[in-house]
Amino acid sequence: MSKQYTPTIGIEIHVQLATKSKMFCACDNNSRSAKPNTNVCPVCLAYPGSLPVVNKGAVELAIKLGYGLNAEIAQTTSFDRKNYFYPDSPKGYQITQMREPIIGEGHIEILVDNEFKKVGIHHAHLEEDAGKSTHPAGKDYSLVDFNRAGTPLVEIVSEPDMHSPLEAKRYLQEIYAIATTLGVSDGDMEHGNFKFDLNVSVSDSDKLGTRTELKNLNSFRNAERALKYEIARQIDLLEKGKAIVQETRGWNDAKGKTVPQRSKEEANDYRYFPEPDIPPLNLSQEFITTLQAEAKKEVLPISVRKELLSLGLNADEQDILVSQAKTRTIFYDAKIVVNNPKLEKKIINWLVGDYQAWKSENNEADSQLSGKHLAELIMLVDEGKISSKTAKEIFADVITGQQPSKVIESKGLTQMSDDSELESIIADIIAKNPQAVADYKGGNEKAAGFFVGQVMAATKGQANPGKANALVLKLLQEQ
Ligand SMILES: [Zn+2]
């Protein structure tokens, strides 16, 4: 490569809102287990004469999301028709917001290589999803399911502020964490709750290059892979003196390639116009402020990240706590109980280590682990009442909801910290190992470690290692 190319990436994310009903009718918003075309009504099937009614719940969730995006909420917001013909759109248009979106300019912070970076949000708007078409292989027909038609979405449009596939991935992960933390979306990625389009161009000057759009991705990993591929493809074309065609491309996961879908010359003219069936919404400042205050009660992922970074956690460890709401709750509850920075790090170690290991082999729904119990377990080790080995052994019991001190009591696992009992065990070991005593006396201080190891073995790990060490040294001095 002879020139230095900078990629520029902008992202549009469709977040499905966690409302009970659809955007403009009373149909159930959850069609996961419904048979095709059973979750429909005259409104979402666009029967003549039917009228859409805005779902207040969707507006409320959009306001909460706006808080997470550090964005202004428009007091007056209205809807528009975006006209296009496609078989999965029963109306022949989509109700969206073009002129007066509910969420205005904002920004989020992302963490890349331990540094925080701002990414601008251009705006975000409410709209409805289309139905779903399937094209059975080898058949001369297509099938359409309208259960998804009319599902409420917020589309978040970023500024083109990202300059690497990793930054784009971090942005997606952060928006996902914000939306799920605030309860705005269930975030079920397999069911299309979180889909995104990536706009990417490369340039070797201040002028932006021709961009392509990678459509309809739904995995963070694939977003990063698709961007890497697409950036390399564009640079390769430029290096060969060829032009980049402005077009929509899809990601072929099996081939690990982006493939052209349609070029912009065939792009639709959407003929936007104000939706005549829905009057503009005038939101009172009180309504907005109340919802923002509710959203404020949740700890936003960026605060979690900043705190975790100060505790020395790397990005992967942070992701665990940021992306797992239950694990995060355990962390915060335990942190209040231990009330000690040194032990906070221990909470993290348990949660990203042993707890993830347990989760990979068990169902998280079966976990009864509470912050209170985890804190107790950690403090029992810290106070020398049990060894860390014992703590690991009883962790599975603690996850089933049992109190650590009760488990220890019922299993007789209390750590031996009685000096006289330990002393007699050590004296016995010293008597049986004259050579090691001689080594120690001869200046080999490592020999003391041998005795501590023997003590731990003799007590099956129940001795307090610190105490055992101190007593071993004391008794060796006396030899
Ligand atoms: Zn309906």
Image (tube, rainbow, N blue to C red):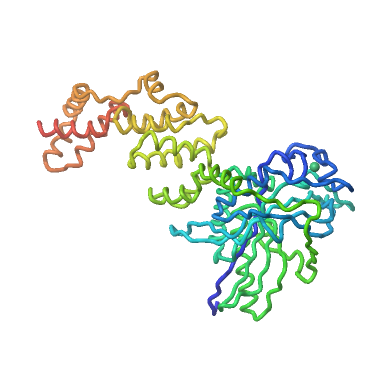
Q: Could you tell me which residue is drawn at 41 percent across and 29 percent down?
A: 393
> Regarding ligand 1, which quadrant of the image does it lie in?
top right
User: Farthest residue in the top direction?
Assistant: 410
Whole-percent x, y for residue 441 in the image: 11, 38
* Residue 145 visible in the snapshot: no
**In the rendered view, does 316 fall on the left or right side of 376?**
right
Q: How many marks?
A: 0
Q: Nearer the viewer, residue 443 or 263?
A: 263
In the image: residue 261, left or right of residue 453: right
Where residue 141 sits: x, y (%)? 89, 51
- On the question of residue 133 being in view, the answer is yes
The residue positioned 13% from the left and 43% from the top of the image is 443
> Looking at the picture, does residue 173 appear above or below residue 199?
above
Q: Quadrant of residue 105?
A: bottom right
Answer with the quarter of the image where residue 420 lies.
Answer: top left
Q: Is residue 156 above or below residue 374?
A: below
Q: Quadrant of the N terminus?
A: bottom right
Can you name the residue that lies furthest to the left here?
478
x, y percentage for residue 300? 50, 47
Residue at the image point whose x is 82% and y is 46% from the top = 51
Q: Quadrant of residue 199?
A: bottom right
- If the image is split into quadrants, where does the C terminus sit? top left
Of residue 380 and residue 1, the one placed in the foreground of this image is 380
Residue 198 drawn at (x, y percent): 64, 61
Q: Is residue 344 left or right of residue 424?
A: right
